[in-house]
Image (cartoon, rainbow, N blue to C red):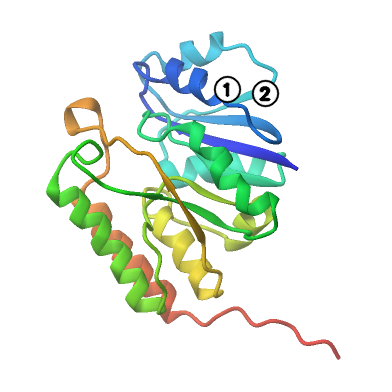
Amino acid sequence: MKLSILMPVYNEEERIADALKQALAVDYPCEIELLIVDDGSRDGTGEILGRADDSRLRVITHQRNAGKGAAIKTAVDNAEGDYMVILDADLEYDPQDIPKLLDPVLDGRAEVVYGNRTFGSHSAYSFWYVMGNKGVTMAANVLFNSYIGDLETCFKLMPVALYRSLDVRSRGFGMEAEVTGKLLRRRIRPYEVPISYRARGREEGKKITWKDGVEAIWILGRERARRRPRVARAS
């Protein structure tokens, strides 16, 4: 099995070198590739990526910023692995947790695995940020009669072919809700494992806002209203 680690990057010159070092230092239980999409960065991110030297690393550049969903689509279209996981470059997530996500897959217990964040004083920069995350997750659970713990988690591990089949259209942060909504609509319930997390604040460059939460709930409602894909019956 080969794992594609997909890293969308936008204006992360202060963190990208550490993000690369941390991601490539993990002792993974399988072959990996680290596929980075520089989504139109206007700072020194591109120069830092250009100096990186590792056979497991590939970099693709968007000339203009198109959003996280668009960057992930580019990465998925170019992924060479059997499975994929998203890893943001902002150092909020610890790549040392990725092997824990792989364990249920490698031993046959799961096909889709989410990393579930436990928010505490060290891992959330505001009360409303946590409530927004919990509100979006609750909306998904109500709409799809499910019980997942963390819809907005970056750590979503699944087969590359499955992600491609979802045909995710959201170009921004709404892709998180769209992916989960489409999985739940297919009655695919993610297996969840606890992960570590440290949120950065606005002054450190955090980009998601309350508007993204409103969009996420709208996307979930849209996906719930759609019919489940029909499975062809053998004649």
Mark 1 touches mark 2? (CB < 8 Å): yes
Q: Residue at x 39, y 60 (%)?
A: 177
Residue 161: mark in rendering: none
Residue in the picture at 36% in, 77% down: 143
- In the rendered image of this protein, does residue 150 appear above or below residue 143? above
List the single residue furthest toward the left. 127
Q: Residue at x 36, y 53 (%)?
A: 152
Spot occupied by residue 172 in the image (x, y as percentages of width and height)? 38, 48
Task: Please name the amino acid that badge 1 sits on.
Answer: Leu
Question: In the picture, which quadrant includes the C terminus?
Answer: bottom right
**Position of the N terminus by quadrant:** top right
Query: Three-letter amino acid code at disc 2?
Result: Arg
Q: Which mark is residue 24?
A: 1
Picture coordinates of residue 226 (x, y %)? 47, 79
Q: Which mark is residue 56?
A: 2
Query: Which residue appears farthest toward the top when viewing the image?
Result: 51
| Helix, strand or loop at mark 2 | loop
234 and 98: which is toward the camera: 98
Number of numbered tags placed on the structure image: 2
Q: Secondary structure at mark 1?
A: helix
Q: Position of residue 53 (x, y in %)?
A: 62, 11
